[in-house]
Image (cartoon, grey):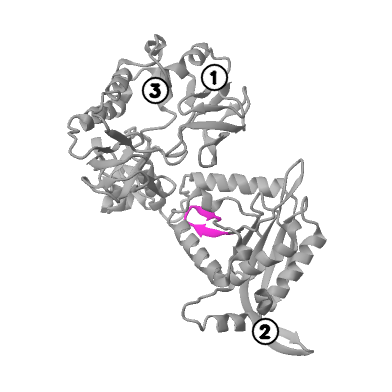
Amino acid sequence: MAEVINMPRLSDTMEEGTVAKWLKKVGEKIEEGDILAEIETDKATMEFESFNEGVLLHIGIEEGETALVDKLLCIIGEKGEDISSLIKGTPDVVVEKNTETKEEIFSEEILEIKESKSIELPKGVEVIMMPRLSDTMTEGTVATWNKKEGDAVEEGDILAEIETDKATMEFESFHTGTLLKIGIAEGESALVDTVLAILGPKGTDVTGIMESYSSSETVSEVKEEKATPAVQEIKKEVPVTVSQPTAASDNVRVFISPLAKKLAEEKGISLKLVKGSGENGRIIKRDIENYVPAASGLSQAYVPVGVEAFEEVKNSQMRKVIARRLGESKFMAPHYYLTVELDMDHAIAARKAINTDPNVKVSFNDMIVKACAMALRKHPRVNTQWTEAATLIAKHIHIGVAVAVEDGLLVPVLKFADQMTFNQIGASVKDLAGRARIKKLTPQEMEGSTFTVSNLGMFGIKEFTSIINQPNSAILSVGAIVQKPVVKNGQIAVGNTMTVTLACDHRTVDGATGAAFLQTLRTFVENPVTMFV
């Protein structure tokens, strides 16, 4: 049965999207998790993942075209399936006017939902729904309310912090008024498009508004089983419930939020053993966090010695993107590697002197980032991007700093790093890395790098190579500082050295260019005073 995929809302302010690129063609086989297209929103260009399997039967919005949210994007189904009625009827039904084709696609329950949500609101009243803040978000958790009922709210004020499947993000008000009603309390989770809050003139009676919207949400969730097949196809685009595999004889359906499911998988908790405290027994985040296994639960999880077993950990969206992008970089860009060993004695002495100022704390990583930025200024061919038509030489220097997080790797970006002092670099890296680890970086803070530094020295790794962070042309891998015997002035002495390896894209950076860059980098690092000139 064909699945209708509509233009998704990929940001809280998105009203329309532009298809930047289709990654699949009509007639191609689609697997769940495949990237269908790159969609440009008002904030960024994002990858849109398929939640369905089948054949791409129809593309409703061509590359370069712009359409409103909920317009027909594409249709996925079985090869040769007749979709003429869906192509003709879906766009008008979803976002425009009433037509007779509604009766063919929507059940009476869904019509009741649409009618209940079109109730007439008192003058000046705005109903704020739980926004879809990421491409995979199906529900959100209110981490913190920054306003309370009765508070005045100005356009641009931060209403709340909302935890998605990817990050905790600030949600900004687009309206001015008084916060008349909070629909989702702190710590509670709710589906996208559930009533989050009601704003309006002070003293306005909003009795009945919450009830009207709440009843429609109940219909959409509880009556899922009663919906017509066509309705179920449309709803699969954003799944409401998740069926957790259980024992062979156990076919019990488990209702669980995506965030709770992710936590359960990370903790290895069987959902059969968890009692949900959410609506209709739904398992939510706090149920997993507060779960204490009983003796019987422990015995079920026990694997006897000598028995082969695997723990299945679902790949997060972040992990999938990392795997795909690094795979593309490694196999599409011809990598080569240049390694040098740096004398760190002067750098150690310089850092010690700089840090005598109680208001300054400079790390070796800060010194490396600064040295890279200054070396890039002297060797602009390393600060490049490859395209089929031309090599782009960046006039600006934005350095990405790789940060390990629980689900993988993030690369926050230091903009115009060559113009920053050691202290500014250190403070910025500390701030960005800290927020990266708690998923509070904005997309803009992870975009636009022209060169990347990856440092594993703090883990005792002496030497390693990295995969280039496309579309950069190079990445520097930084190892640990080690004490070892070295030859100085013809005599063996104890010295401190650091090994760094430059991975280059041979399409844009020739071997001699990469070697010259490392020579300049060596000069800056081994003689830090030169970075102050």
Q: Position of residue 301 (x, y in %)?
A: 36, 50
Question: In the rendered image, which residue does mark 1 sit on?
Answer: 78
Q: Which residues are magenta?
A: 401-411
Of callouts 1 and 2, the N-terminal one:
1
* Separation of marks 3 and 2 at Cα, in angstroms: 69 Å
Of callouts 1 and 3, the N-terminal one:
1
Q: Amino acid at mark 3?
A: Gln
* Separation of marks 1 and 3 at Cα, in angstroms: 16 Å
Let me know if residue 240 appears in the view: yes
Q: Amino acid at mark 2?
A: Gly
- Nearer-the-camera pick, 79 or 192: 192
Q: Residue at x 52, y 14 (%)?
A: 83
Mark 1 Cα-neighbour bin, 10 Å: few <14, some 14–19, many ≥20: some
> From the viewer's perspective, is the residue at label 1 or at label 2 nearer?
2
For residue 232, the mark is 3
The quadrant holding residue 344 is bottom right
Q: Residue at x 57, y 71 (%)?
A: 422
Mark 2 Cα-neighbour bin, 10 Å: few <14, some 14–19, many ≥20: some
Q: Do the numbered discs 1 and 2 sit on residues whose CB atoms are within 8 Å?
A: no
Quadrant where the C terminus sits is bottom right
Check residue 261 for magenta coloring.
no
Q: Position of residue 174 (x, y in %)?
A: 37, 40
Question: In the rendered image, which residue does mark 2 sit on?
Answer: 495
